[in-house]
Image (cartoon, rainbow, N blue to C red):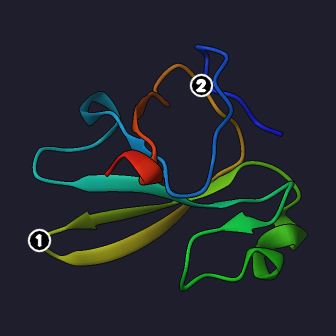
């Protein structure tokens, strides 16, 4: 399992706080690599070769972009859980 600095577990589908993202951008965790947990449309096992971290989908005016974050730092803050949206 991977955790935010607050101690909350990071889960697939979590939307990240605006401080993490650029203006007008939505960022959400789409794959938690160590557990292979993934949101609909992604296959967690496709990313296990990376071994650590998360895949984050950033959506802005230019489209959707996936970024691998191998380490979690204080910039990762939970805005809301997928189940809360």
Q: Is residue 29 left or right of residue 1?
A: left
From the image, tell me which residue sits under label 1. 61
**Residue 23, percent across and down?**
12, 44
Residue 65 versus residue 80 in the image, above or below: below
Secondary structure under the numbered disc 2 in the rendered image = loop
Nearest to the observer: residue 24 or residue 7: 7
Q: Farthest residue toward the front? A: 83
* Residue 59 x/y as whole percent: 27, 66
Q: Residue at x 26, y 55 (%)?
A: 26
From this view, report whether residue 76 is shown above or below residue 32.
Answer: above
Image point 33% across, 33% down: which residue?
17
- In the picture, the disc for residue 16 is none
In this image, 17 relative to 44: left or right?
Answer: left
Q: Is residue 44 left or right of residue 75?
A: right
Residue 67 percent coordinates (x, y): 52, 62
Marks 2 and 1 in Cβ contact (< 8 Å): no
Residue farthest along the top direction in this orientation: 6
Asked where in the image residue 32 lies, by quadrant, the reply is: bottom right
Q: Which mark sits nearer the N-terminus, 2 or 1?
A: 1
Which element type, helix, strand or loop, lies under badge 1? loop
Q: Which residue is mark 2?
A: 73
Query: CA–CA distance between discs 2 and 1?
Result: 26 Å
């Amino acid at each position: 399992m991977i955790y935010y600095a607050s101690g909350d577990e990071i889960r697939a589908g979590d939307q990240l706080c605006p401080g993490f993202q650029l203006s007008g951008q939505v960022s959400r965790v789409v794959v938690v690599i160590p557990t292979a947990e993934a949101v609909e449309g992604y296959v967690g096992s496709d990313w296990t070769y990376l071994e650590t971290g998360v895949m984050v989908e950033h959506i802005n005016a230019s489209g959707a972009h996936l970024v691998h974050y191998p380490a979690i730092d204080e910039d990762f803050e939970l805005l809301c859980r997928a189940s809360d949206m």
